[in-house]
Amino acid sequence: MDFQTLILFIILGLSIIAFIRELFPMEVVSFSAMVLLVLFGVVTPNEAVSGFSNPAVVTVGALFVLSTALVKTNILNILVLKLEDIGGNRQWLVIGILLVAIAVVSSFINNVAAMAITLPLAMQLAQRFKLSPSRILLPLSYASMFGGTMTLIGTSTNLLVNNVVTKAGYPALGMFEFTKMGLVFTAFGLVYVFILAQRYMPNRAIISSLTRKYRMSSYLTEVQISEDSPLVGSTCLSQNVSQQFNIIILEIVRNGEKMSTDLRNRILQVGDLLIVQGKLDDIIKMKSELKVNLLTDIKLNDEDLNDAENMVQEVVVSPGSNFIGSSLKYINFRARYGLFVLAIQRASTTLRDKVSHIRLREGDTLLVFGHRSKFNQLRQSRDVFVLDVLPVQLHKIKFWWLPVVILPAIMIFSALEIIDIMSASLVGVSLLLLFRVLTPQEMYQSINWSVIFLIATFISVGRGMENTQAATMIAALFQHIGNSVWIEWAPNIVLSTLLLVTALITGYLSNNSVAIIMTPIAIATALGMGVDPRPFIFAVAFAASASFFTPMGYKTNLMVFGPGNYQMADFMRAGLPLNLLFWIIGSLLIPVFWPF
């Protein structure tokens, strides 16, 4: 092993550890890896930054824009709701239709966009049928992954694999070349998740009150202003209530009238009720120093906070959100949106202390309270999505039908090889801008820049594997496995091993990173065995999208973690059998569809 190959393995190993341990954001890790590869001469500076002009990266960015334009019209929401209406009051028929719908939608738009559409609908269905959300949200995430495997543009993983393949001098992967195997995976997968949702998913107790779900009873209470309180005739701002006692004033109730705006500057009166959020010790300190009466016999819940003007709602931090890595205080959330974050649910942990100072992560679920009108602004943000469903109608802006036409046209023209996928996508974005279906600002906001940056910088690792002996050395390990069995079965055994290893790795790394690492290895393995690389290439493409047994490997899993109140063990129990099923099916059928 030469020095540069050793350096590449060390950098790759450190990157994998940083990814798994979440020591830094993934794009920071990939950028640092790129810089180290340049410093040690594994790649040239031009090779390192070439990822930013890589056709796959450009195409992924364009598809983000096209997906946003299609979502903006609300046509997909209407379509899904119409399909649900077909099911009527037949609970599992409606849920089955929803699972099929997201699989189909995910085959031609970004998975995250598809989940953002269907996740609030799924929450509404759970409430309508008195089902625990944990029964259906994880199956919904899995279904979106199945759908993404059916076309070249169904997931960025397929586009990245295709880019490595074409750079290696092989024919491009066809738009619908994935479909035959993808349909098999989707059919078996949908049957599996439907049975899973019906019988085997955790049936966590249905918690009708969000405040009970977040265990807020000891953090929310009412206090009443007494005659001798220094608050009488004063304001919360002048008494410095929030800072002095670490208390949040959510509402003021005066003679039965609730006030929830400009609370800091309202002149307080004797008998005013303050609905406050804070730790019990801080509330008791406030009682002693400000001479307020603590109404300890009252337990506040959603009914106390929800009324014609105010509401409590769950809000999920979107993948690629600008909020990730920042605290609510830093982004000035309260002033920007006029809303209060009462608690944060992260994985199976509920954070209620000093929430304004907690750095947000992708997939965090926020319990938010405030005026109903303020949520409208929040719904327009691409940094979060609100888990409620409003009446949906078609947004008939001028040329609203253009996104509906453009995406199928891109797929058809690319499939017929009239124009390459990148050029077709860029033409589509150009048309959307020229006809003002999207503004330039909406275009910028629609692109998940963290994903783009991660892919663009990590491509340098793939380039490093080409420049060194790394891919060949790893391929030799797979070949050794093949050589240890009957020679006529060697390619099948090696392909099956490659499928399994790729699927296991993608449970802990980004699916895009896995595609970049494993595709050169797949090609080198096939060449070393003297067989056609295509079945090995498709093995990597499908396995890299099979991140079922952990929440980290795929963004849609993170999106459902909080709202579904899941635990890590839920992903293992539900995902490992599914990974095993896909491994068996792929091992048997990939060599049939793409012979050696």
Image (cartoon, helix red, strand yellow):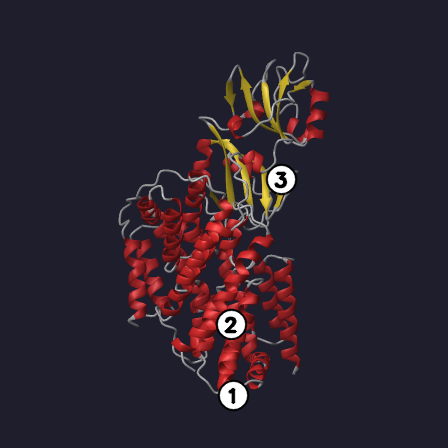
Which residue is labeled 1 in the image?
487
Amino acid found under the numbered disc labelled 1:
Ile
**How far, Cα to Cα, is label 1 from label 3?**
61 Å
Please provide percent x and percent y for residue 73: 33, 47
Indicate the quadrant where residue 44 lies: bottom right
Q: Which mark is residue 355?
A: 3
**How far, Cα to Cα, is label 2 from label 1?**
19 Å
Please provide percent x and percent y for residue 437: 32, 50
Q: Nearer the viewer, mark 3 or mark 2?
A: 2
Give whichever of 446, 144 is nearer the camera: 144
3 or 2: tag closer to the N-terminus: 3
Amino acid found under the numbered disc labelled 2:
Leu
Q: Are marks 3 and 2 in contact (CB under 8 Å)?
A: no
- The kind of secondary structure element at disc 3 is helix
Q: Residue at x 40, y 60 (%)?
A: 147
Q: Are marks 1 and 3 in contact (CB under 8 Å)?
A: no
Please provide percent x and percent y for residue 30: 58, 64
Which part of the image, by quadrant, shows the C terminus? bottom left
Q: Are marks 2 and 1 in contact (CB under 8 Å)?
A: no
> Vertical placement of 373 versus 236: above or below?
below
Which residue is labeled 2 in the image?
499
